[in-house]
């Protein structure tokens, strides 16, 4: 095999390895997001305020704990999420069916939850804040 062919093969192998690593990183982030999203919605559903607040980005505003405790989630559905071009933000629609303990009328709201990947902490955090119930 000529020197040129060997060089081409080595370069192609290196390019494919780098591309494969980038694809694996994006796949890992996507899987990591799905886990975080599920855990947050579960914390909101079961009224676990401290756990839910830990998912908020530094820029997001935490809800009033009393209002948070007065809301009971009866059901929720998550929609397909959209990933930004730089893969650092994700927008996901979530529909909550809920009632407030002071009203007892079931209502429904759909919110666009915006998540941001924090490279310093290596995880996804909710930028948009919690729904207004």
Image: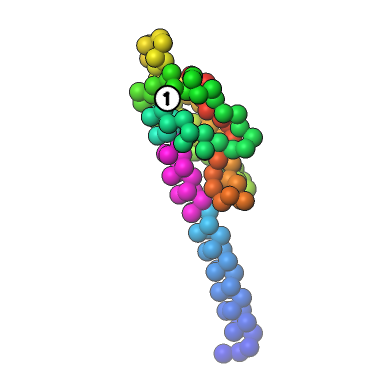
Task: Please name the residue that numbered disc 1 is placed on.
Answer: 96
Residue occupying image coordinates x 50% and y 59%: 24
Relative to 38, does residue 2 appear above or below in the rendering?
below
Could you say where residue 125 lies in the image, as x and y percent from the top left? 55, 40
Is the magenta region chiefly helix, strand or loop? Answer: helix
Q: Is residue 31 covered in magenta?
A: yes
Could you say where residue 92 lies in the image, as x and y percent from the top left? 50, 35
Q: Quadrant of residue 57?
A: top right
Q: Secondary structure at mark 1?
A: strand
Residue occupying image coordinates x 53% and y 57%: 25
Q: In this figure, what is the number of numbered marks?
A: 1
Q: Is residue 66 visible?
A: yes
Q: Is residue 66 left or right of residue 98?
A: right
The N terminus: image quadrant: bottom right
Q: Quadrant of residue 107?
A: top left
State how the image is colored: rainbow
Q: Is residue 87 visible?
A: no
Q: Is residue 107 left or right of residue 119?
A: left
Residue occupying image coordinates x 64% and y 85%: 4
Residue occupying image coordinates x 59% and y 69%: 15
Q: Is residue 122 covered in magenta?
A: no
Could you say where residue 102 lies in the image, as x and y percent from the top left? 41, 11
**Alpha-carbon neighbours of circle 1 within 10 Å: few (<14), some, or many (≥20)?**
many
Magenta residues? 27-40
Relative to 90, does residue 1 appear above or below in the rendering?
below
């Amino acid at each position: 095999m000529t020197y040129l062919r060997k060089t081409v093969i080595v370069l192609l192998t290196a390019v494919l390895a780098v591309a494969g690593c980038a694809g694996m990183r994006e796949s890992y982030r996507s899987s990591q997001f799905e886990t975080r999203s599920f855990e947050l919605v579960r914390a909101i559903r079961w009224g676990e305020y401290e756990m839910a607040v830990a998912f908020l980005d530094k820029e997001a505003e935490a809800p009033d704990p009393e209002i948070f405790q007065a809301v009971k989630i009866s059901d929720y559905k998550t929609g397909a999420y959209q990933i930004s071009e730089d893969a650092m933000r994700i927008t996901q629609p979530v529909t909550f069916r809920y009632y407030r303990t002071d009203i007892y009328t079931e209502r429904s709201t759909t919110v666009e939850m915006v998540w941001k990947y924090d490279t310093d902490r290596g995880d996804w955090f909710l930028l948009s804040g919690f729904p207004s119930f």
